[in-house]
Amino acid sequence: MKLLLKNREMLLVVAIVALVALIALRFPPFVTPGNLANVYNDTSILIILALGQMAVILTRCIDLSMAANLALSGMVAAMINAAMPGLPIPLVILIVMALGAVLGSINGLLVWKLDIPPIVVTLGTLTIYRGLIFLLSGGAWINAHQMSDAFKALPRTAVLGFPLLSWLSLVIIGIMVVVMRRTPLGRAFFAVGGNPHAAVYTGIDVGRTRFFAYCLSGTLAGLAGYLWVSRYAVAYVDIAAGFELDIIAACVIGGISIAGGIGSVGGAVLGALFLGVIKNALPVINISPFAQMAISGTVIIIAVAVNARAEKRKGRVILRKAEAAHG
């Protein structure tokens, strides 16, 4: 049991399984393979965004503008498609991913070069990006009939029985695992978040590392922007309004420490899935939206408390070892 409590990912797996089992008692069709696959597919965009946010949080920063980046990138994707329906969809995706990276880099530069607190920077850019959507679109919606069939079809295209959106999220999970475990950049994210001063002494540029974290989160937000508008076949100013809270919640629930330096790809994915199960399950068992918000908020507070206790325990262990070494 103690081992289970220490392993955050395993604890989340158990929690998700227990949650699904409880829901099955009230609504058995929820646990059919087809429905569970739909739950994963519904959560895929959140997973992609949580992985980008994870990289930022690991470096002791935060990105409140991810949902606004998604919305602006999604609107641009929809406008490009409406104006040039014959443009290849992969090119549209590359354009909005590049746009997302630029928007993320703005956050990174402001944090790096001007040393402005990340929460202030991204709160400001959140508002700016939302405003830009209105300026670009004039407040108008782009609806399904204005989008090409190819534009709308990509996320829904079935490959081996599953939508391409689900497969894409799995590919990104795999890429992020490699980045975090096998590349100097991934190790730098952890080093900067764990101890920025020590990271400097090892030759890591803290500001540059944070800049790349924001570029990564922006790129994934740009991709998510296309996926969002193509899946739901609509683009408007308030796309994904408030979704940044879900993104951060997924990370926190997954054990990504807001203090930086602690977390994993698996944790971020499981945190997103936990939220996805809650959001998909509560409506089918007739729980009101207000109760859903309260439950989600309670889960976040519990997750933060668990993270804080875990970090305190680690601190005590380090102190005990230091005392023993000097004793």
Image (tube, rainbow, N blue to C red):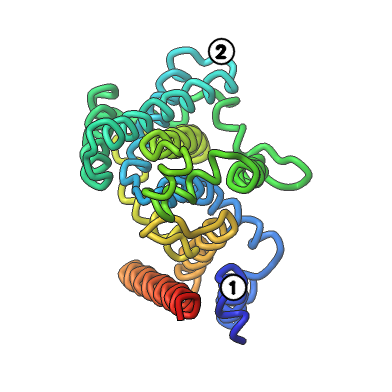
Distance from Cα at disc 2 to Cα at disc 1: 50 Å
Residue at which label 1 appears:
7
State whether residue 233 appears in this view.
no
Q: Quadrant of the rendered structure where residue 165 is?
A: top right
Q: Earlier in the sequence, mark 2 or mark 1?
A: 1
Query: Which structural element holds mark 1?
Result: loop
- The correct choice, above or below, for 241 with respect to 77 in the image is below
Q: Position of residue 117 (x, y in %)?
A: 23, 45
Q: Which mark is residue 132?
A: none
Given the image, on which type of amino acid does mark 2 rest?
Gly
Q: What percent of the width, then of the height, locates residue 290?
A: 30, 69
Specify whether residue 182 is in view. Answer: yes
- The residue labelled by disc 2 is 86
Answer yes or no: do the residues labelled 2 and 1 have beta carbons within 8 Å?
A: no
Amino acid, disc 1: Asn
Q: Work out whether 31 lies above or below 217.
A: below
Q: Residue at x 58, y 22 (%)?
A: 89
**Mark 1 surroundings: few (<14), some (14-19) or many (≥20) residues within 10 A:** few
